[in-house]
Amino acid sequence: MPDSLYILAVVAATSGAAYAAGRRLGMRAGLVPAALRRAIRLVGACLLFWGGNIAIGAGVALLVRGLGLGFIWLYVNTDVSVLVLSAVQALVFESWRAQHHHEQERARQTPERADDSTGCPAAPGLAHEPLRGARE
């Protein structure tokens, strides 16, 4: 079996196990396409960070060389640790972006708060609403 088929088989097996575990935990199968789109977005962000890190690292290495401050090998910027750290950068950035998106959606869905005549802010909603279970 060629190495590439072996790797695909291992990834397919772990993906199948993860799918089965998710279904057992009650996750809906219909959410898989959205999860796949998000994963592709994460991979894209990772590649952007990786390319940026390599480009900036190469630029700094050439600048250090040009200024006579020392010598940095260019290949150091292609170390696997740069890829791993780029993946972490992408995960953090995408999580931050998703949080921002959810906050914006929540702000759009929350109605304006009304003020009562005494200047005290009203409870969330368009007017004072009695608490559930409270006597009127």
Image: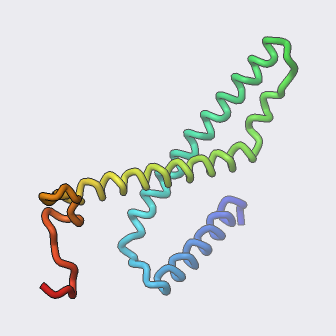
Mark count: 0
Considering depth in this image, is 30 or 90 the residue closer to the camera?
90
Q: Position of residue 69 (x, y in %)?
A: 85, 17
Considering depth in this image, is 11 or 114 the residue closer to the camera?
114
Query: What colour-coding does the image apply?
Result: rainbow
Which quarter of the figure has residue 120? bottom left
Q: Quadrant of the C terminus?
A: bottom left
The answer to whether residue 112 shows anywhere in this view is no
Q: Position of residue 26 (x, y in %)?
A: 43, 84
Residue located at (75% from left, 46% from top): 80
Residue located at (19% from left, 55% from top): 119
Can you say whether 29 is above or below 67 in the image?
below
Which quarter of the figure has residue 9? bottom right
Residue located at (71% from left, 43% from top): 82
Q: Quadrant of the N terminus?
A: bottom right
Can you say whether 72 is above or below 119 in the image?
above
The answer to whether residue 102 shows anywhere in this view is yes
Q: Position of residue 94 (x, y in %)?
A: 49, 51
Residue located at (71% from left, 29% from top): 57
Q: Position of residue 72 (x, y in %)?
A: 83, 26
Considering depth in this image, is 114 or 64 the residue closer to the camera?
114
Can you say whether 99 is above or below 57 in the image?
below
Left or right, 105 with respect to 58, comes to left
Left or right, 12 with respect to 67, comes to left
Extreme residue toward the front, this view = 118
Considering depth in this image, is 88 or 126 the residue closer to the camera?
126
Extreme residue toward the right, this view = 70
Left or right, 100 with respect to 133, comes to right
